[in-house]
Amino acid sequence: MHISERSPLKKNYDIIIIGGAIMGASAAWFLSDNKDFDGSVLVVEKDPSYANSSTMHTNSCMRQQFSTDLNVRISQFAADYVKNLRKFMGGDERVPELTIRNFGYMYFADNEDFADVLRESQRVQLRAGAATQLMSPREIKEKYPFYNVDDIVLGSINLIDEGYWDGTAVFDWWRRQSKERGVEYIANEVVAMTKGKSGTQIESVTLKSGDVISCGQVLNASGPRANRTAAMAGIDVPVEPRKRYSWIFAAEQPLDQDLPLTIDPSGVHVRENGGGTYQCGGHSGIDPAVDYDDFTMDFDIWQDHVWPILATRIPQFEAIKVQTEWAGHYAYNTFDHNAIMGPHSEVSNFYFLNGFSGHGLQQSPAMGRGTAEMLIYGTYKTLDMSPFNYERIPNNKPIIEKAVI
């Protein structure tokens, strides 16, 4: 699809955000919402339909079941933000009142090693104030009789602030309200960057339309294309597109209660979608990086891998019919599967908001807030996100998050 490039209104901006999907939109909104910031912001998005963005291909769920305290607290802020969206947006009566449909996440362990991981993670979650429960196979079967748990050692579930939320509504309102406050969004593409003589600052970006725009700071919010954007600044960031497949199917015999977002030990996951339909996700056993524009479905994965696993774990899913299917991309951080934030260690006005490895949507409120704080103050003011700063990568200090789906 051809998108007509539009030139920006000015030749200089305090902050240029490259990528206008959920992360770029969050950062732009939090900048516009900060009373200490009155600078100019330009958001450059190559495809304003967002049709192939990770944002549009998401499960739109959130969870607190992470293995690191910071990731738990990031999702707790997201839950508070979503449930109080109108309040956070200044009481604007146009903004909808949102809720979280709390069907929970159900992690299954089929061996003692992973059961120990769930036990250890629960301790982290409880200390942070989450309500995670561990369940024996017998307890799982009593509460969720549709599961086959013959091979299961332990389950982990949290029914408070875990489940579906309307990510599209939040995304739309971030863009709408930030535009009303003066943030400029354009359909265009950054194709080059120019550094100053010292090599420590980005002085300007060149757009596909030919415009050369000078800038104070640059934020890389380009999702799976993060490394392509960073390369224009002579920087390598360990983020690549990994293909993830999704299916929505109807069951001939729907379950008579909500289905938690169930993470099978195989990695296949499935959740309640409503009206006797369910959403399922998975990927191939071989999981290479793919081309940025490769969204081709592999139809054999469903027939040979995903459906047999579903039918084994939930026997009522033996008779189901796929209604729609698509392939999307994770912005996969090959270093440690966690967010990459903060400034570059040498090009000091180049900032990262990348590498979320599948849990970006639920982290976007805290990530946008933290990034806006870093851009304005040079430090985090609310939740300390510094463990996720870029400098950990050249220093080879990964943060291991064990709960990556």
Image (tube, rainbow, N blue to C red):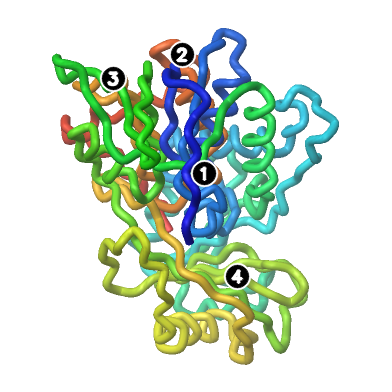
Mark nearer the viewer, 1 or 4: 1
Q: Which mark is residue 21?
A: 1
Instruction: Tell me the residue at 34%/36% (across/down).
Output: 340
Element on which disc 3 rests: strand
Which residue is the site of mark 2?
376
Q: Amino acid at mark 1?
A: Ala
- 179 sits to left or right of 331: right
> Which of the 4 quarters of the picture holds residue 371?
top left
Mark 2 vs 3, N-terminal side? 3
Element on which disc 2 rests: helix
Mark 4 vs 2, N-terminal side? 4
Mark 4 vs 3, N-terminal side? 3
Q: Is residue 240 visible?
A: yes
Residue 155 lies, with reference to residue 118, above or below; the image says below
Measure the alpha-carbon separation of dots 2 and 3.
18 Å
Element on which disc 4 rests: strand
Residue 123 lies, with reference to residue 270, above or below; the image says above
Which residue is the site of mark 4?
279
Which residue is the site of mark 3?
203
Q: Amino acid at mark 4?
A: Gln
Residue 147 in percent (x, y) is at 60, 77
Frontmost residue, 288 versus 4: 4
